[in-house]
Image: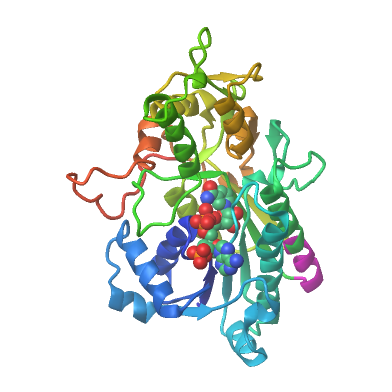
Amino acid sequence: MRVALTGATGFLGLRLLDELLRRHRSVTVLARGEPDRVLDRLTRGLGRFAAGHTAAGLAARVRVVPVRLAEDNLGLTGGAHRELADSLDVVWHCAGNTTLDGDPAVLRRVNVEGTRQVLGLAAAGRRLPAVFHVSTAFVAGARRTGTVFEDELTDAYGFEGSYERSKYEAERLVHAWARETGRPAVIFRPSVLTTGLPPHPDLPEHPLLNIERALTGIGREHFGAGRRPELLLPGQPRFRLVGRPDGQLNLLPVERAAAVMTRLAELPQGEGVQTYHIVHGRDTPVDVLRSLAERLAGVPVAIVPELTDPTPYESLTDCVGGVFRYLRQRRRYDDSRVRAALGPPGIPQDIGVDYLMAGLLPRAPDLPDPRPDPRPEGTDQ
Ligand SMILES: NC(=O)c1ccc[n+]([C@@H]2O[C@H](COP(=O)([O-])OP(=O)(O)OC[C@H]3O[C@@H](n4cnc5c(N)ncnc54)[C@H](OP(=O)(O)O)[C@@H]3O)[C@@H](O)[C@H]2O)c1
């Protein structure tokens, strides 16, 4: 079985690559940049958490094809495109721009046009490669409450930002592709992906690190040399973030997401587009994220429904905080299709503050490196 993967150098893609290499003799990585450098990044990244990968072993099993994602034919010559397409049985599309409030034109180019090109590659393949498209649970948009079902795809609620819209449009393309080609496709919608693996220069960054940066900045402003007294005003002794105190978000270990997605990909495909919510069996209360914020900022943090008389720093956080707006959500994701396919989930391990902190703060230099291959135990599925 010949498998191609885009986005392998990213936070999720690296875990997907690990899972795919457990199942297949070789994987073709479609990436930007010079192949040797891409392979070196993959080798160093996998070396941080996955046992058994050597540089020589990976060089023999991973073929890197340099592509330009959003260009016609992925930037390949007609012949190279045809040869690549005809060599594949499976195409995983995981590359994407995840900047929540990024430039809509850039997001569109990478996430929508990039998807169009990957679908074009799959359409051209003589062996009719299967398509696995990595989307996001956040295509549900600005809807903040209720239950989101796997078959729903609507823009009726609007979107919290340009990233969500671009991923929604990409899903629409997958549906159109399936209709036009008469071929099946699978869409995976992971929720917010987390890790307990400490950040390291050899590892891709992950979205929660943005929260860490914003909030440790608050701590510095308050306690550091550039202390700003207006951060916490007299009579308002807490730093406030706008959200629902009873809100909840779905957070899922990235390792778990990759494992569930690759297991689902092994099942026989139905007709048309099958969409799966790749989510944790238990939502994480916003209060856990409040406690995390408190630990990071080093000041008491409150979640408030609205911000009256914001301090300058609070206004700034409210404005720049693409991620903070998700503290206003209390929706849940129905994952019946995943449960029907893989059986009832085990007892899920809650996502806690200590786990999240471990994935945000660099490891103290005197501590040993993490053990390779840390599988989160007892999570769902
Ligand atoms: N992280 C999450 O919490 C989360 C949750 C739900 C869904 N997702 C989805 O999962 C996928 C991967 O996300 P991630 O968190 O792994 O993101 P990431 O760490 O930022 O990785 C993005 C990947 O896409 C590649 N890429 C980005 N722009 C590109 C371009 N213009 N041309 C070619 N390649 C490009 C990157 O390549 P370089 O290394 O060369 O930059 C990298 O391999 C995305 O589709 C995202 O929407 C992520």
Q: In this view, does 256 lie to the left or right of 72?
A: left
Can you give x and y, in whole percent of width and height, for residue 121 in the image?
Answer: 66, 77
Q: How many marks?
A: 0
Q: Where is residue 314 in the image (x, y as percent from the top left)?
A: 57, 26
- Residue 178 placement, left or right of 370: right
- Residue at the (79%, 64%) spot, across then down: 176
Q: Magenta region's main secondary structure?
A: helix
**Which residue occupies the foreground of this view, 35 or 131?**
35
Q: Is residue 38 above or below residue 255?
A: below
Residue in the picture at 72% in, 59% down = 105
Q: Is residue 270 visible?
A: no
Q: Does the magenta stretch include residue 181?
A: yes
Identify the residue at horizontal 33%, vertical 65% (top origin): 44
Q: What stretch is highlighted in magenta?
A: 174-182
User: Which residue occupies the foreground of this view, 283 or 1?
Assistant: 283
**Is 321 on the left-hand or right-hand side of 164?**
left
Q: Does the magenta stretch include residue 330?
A: no
